[in-house]
């Protein structure tokens, strides 16, 4: 469960920005779009979804990229990032001060029914600060803190009394460009597993959906439990598909392009030797009620993308994932977007309190029938830097319920601005 995410000085983001999944005091759609945290003390309610709107190049995607960057650093830091390797961080470059300042990430989340607050500060050379606080039973515990002291050219460490394990060995084994969390996990810290596992198993960031592989959905379809469920989703989505017919066949080199270099062809043939290929057909019903098989590649882009999506979607709903997607509306009809969103708001389907965060240009779902006001976020540039703010910050006008219309009227900002071509051409002509 995600409570909030903070980022500072990353790509188009200059000042600290916060995406909060905490429910506001507003009461609308409370039974469907919110859920309580499992904490016995200091329990709060969280949102099942959040959407971010804004013009192109405003920085919508960069908030999601920041989540992905934090996740990759946690997962790769202990093993894949070697000593001396530059850390993959791009600060805000349009200010002479910030381009030399560190980037900062922090996330507050719940894993295994315990709330955690974890973050770090870094530049391309090293981790400058790192911290982790736990809140079992609602009581704050400092597990560890580290801070690099420039004047001492060394890192200071602090470990709380509630944090156990080989702290000395773990800290001494942590490289300057590595995270302590990742290093300690590599060295078998059991206490930190719920924190690391949240990044590894629960946070699912799809920074792009262009090349989403349907293979995961095919794997699920091979299991009777999921086959029935996927068929139900295909039926509900009204794609005129009764199901899938998936068969295995031997690899056939004749499918490779005739102009492919011979060494590459030989390598592929060697790699695919003794492996099976999947042949996927979609099952339709004829007017007479007979099954008709279509090559799945002949289906529409929207249908193919839906099938690629539905595997991660079902897995996320079942596992309680935090599913983060850029441009959900891409290749999808607005009604399909609405259908996918409302799966996260359906308490009979979303039994594990999964959360969905996505960017979109599709304003047809920007309605109070689908979203609470605290679920709708906007992004716009202010002095060249991205800023994010929620609709809940705007006092609702009496009698005004059309959020989409108010958005396009400019009430909330975050709209694209197109200079008049006519005026631009006229100014150019006058100048001549």
Image (tube, rainbow, N blue to C red):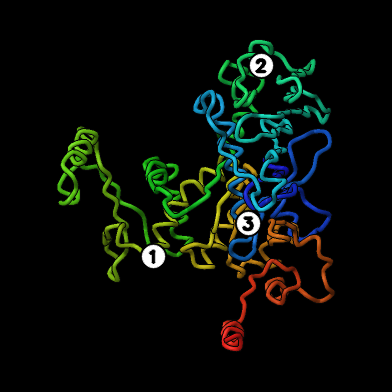
Quadrant holding the N terminus: top right
Q: Is residue 104 visible?
A: no
Q: Residue at x 76, y 28 (%)?
A: 133
Q: Is residue 138 visible?
A: yes
Q: In x, y percent, where is residue 396?
A: 82, 69
Q: How many marks?
A: 3
Q: Residue at x 44, y 55 (%)?
A: 210
Looking at the image, tell me whether mark 1 or mark 2 is earlier in sequence order.
2
Of circles 3 and 1, the one toward us is 3
Vertical side of 429 occupied by 12: above or below: above
Q: Nearer the viewer, residue 280 or 199?
A: 199
Separation of marks 2 and 3 at Cα, in angstroms: 36 Å
- Secondary element under disc 1, as helix, strand or loop, is loop
Q: Which residue is disc 1 drawn over? A: 240
Q: Nearer the viewer, residue 362 or 66?
A: 66
As drawn, the residue found furthest toward the front would be 432
Q: Which residue is disc 2 drawn over? A: 171
Q: Does the CB distance between marks 3 and 1 fall below 8 Å?
A: no
Looking at the image, tell me whether mark 2 or mark 3 is earlier in sequence order.
3
Q: In x, y percent, where is residue 170?
A: 64, 15
Write down the quadrant of residue 144 in the picture. top right
Vertical side of 75 occupied by 407: above or below: below
Q: Does the CB distance between marks 1 and 2 fall below 8 Å?
A: no
Q: Nearer the viewer, residue 270 or 251?
A: 270
- Secondary element under disc 3, as helix, strand or loop, is loop
Write down the quadrant of residue 367 in the picture. bottom right
- Secondary element under disc 2, as helix, strand or loop, is helix
Q: Nearer the viewer, residue 201 or 103?
A: 103
Left or right position of 427 against 157: left
Left or right position of 275 against 185: left
Quadrant holding the C terminus: bottom right
Query: In the rendering, which numbered label is found on residue 59?
Result: 3
């Amino acid at each position: 469960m995600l409570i909030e995410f903070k980022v500072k000085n990353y790509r188009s983001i200059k000042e600290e920005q916060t995406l909060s999944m905490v429910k506001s005091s507003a009461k609308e759609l409370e039974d469907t779009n919110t859920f309580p945290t499992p904490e016995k003390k200091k329990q709060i309610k969280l949102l099942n979804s959040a959407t971010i709107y804004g013009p192109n190049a405003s920085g919508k995607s960069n908030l999601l990229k920041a989540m992905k960057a934090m996740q990759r650093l946690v997962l790769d830091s202990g093993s894949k990032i070697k000593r001396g390797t530059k850390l993959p961080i791009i600060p805000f470059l349009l200010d002479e001060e910030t381009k030399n300042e560190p980037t900062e990430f922090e996330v507050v989340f719940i894993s295994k029914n315990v709330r955690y607050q974890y973050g770090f500060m870094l530049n391309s050379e090293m981790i400058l600060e790192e911290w982790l606080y736990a809140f079992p039973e609602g009581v704050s515990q400092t597990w560890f803190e580290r801070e690099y002291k420039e004047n001492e050219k060394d890192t200071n460490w602090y470990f709380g009394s509630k944090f156990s394990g080989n702290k000395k060995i773990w800290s001494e084994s942590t490289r300057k460009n590595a995270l302590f969390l990742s290093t300690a996990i590599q060295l078998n810290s059991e206490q930190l597993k719920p924190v690391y596992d949240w990044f590894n198993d629960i946070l699912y960031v799809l920074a792009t959906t262009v090349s989403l592989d349907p293979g995961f959905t095919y794997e699920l379809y091979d299991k009777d439990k999921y086959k029935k469920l996927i068929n139900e989703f295909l039926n509900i989505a009204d794609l005129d598909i009764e199901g899938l017919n998936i068969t295995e066949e031997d690899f056939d080199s004749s499918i490779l392009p005739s102009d492919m270099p011979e060494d590459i062809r030989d390598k592929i043939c060697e790699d695919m030797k003794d492996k099976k290929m999947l042949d996927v057909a979609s099952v339709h019903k004829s007017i007479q009620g007979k099954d008709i098989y279509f090559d799945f590649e002949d289906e529409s882009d929207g249908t193919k993308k839906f099938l690629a999506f539905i595997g991660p979607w079902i897995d996320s709903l079942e596992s309680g994932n935090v599913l983060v997607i850029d441009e959900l509306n891409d290749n999808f009809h607005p009604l399909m977007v609405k259908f996918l969103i409302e799966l996260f708001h359906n308490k009979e389907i979303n039994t594990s309190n999964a959360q969905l965060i996505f960017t979109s240009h599709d304003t047809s779902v920007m309605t109070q029938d689908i979203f609470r006001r605290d679920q709708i976020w906007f992004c716009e540039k202010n002095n060249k830097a991205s800023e994010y703010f929620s609709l809940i910050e705007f006092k609702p006008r009496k009698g005004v319920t059309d959020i989409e219309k108010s958005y396009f009227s400019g009430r909330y900002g975050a709209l694209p601005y197109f200079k008049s071509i006519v005026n631009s051409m006229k100014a150019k002509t006058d100048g001549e």
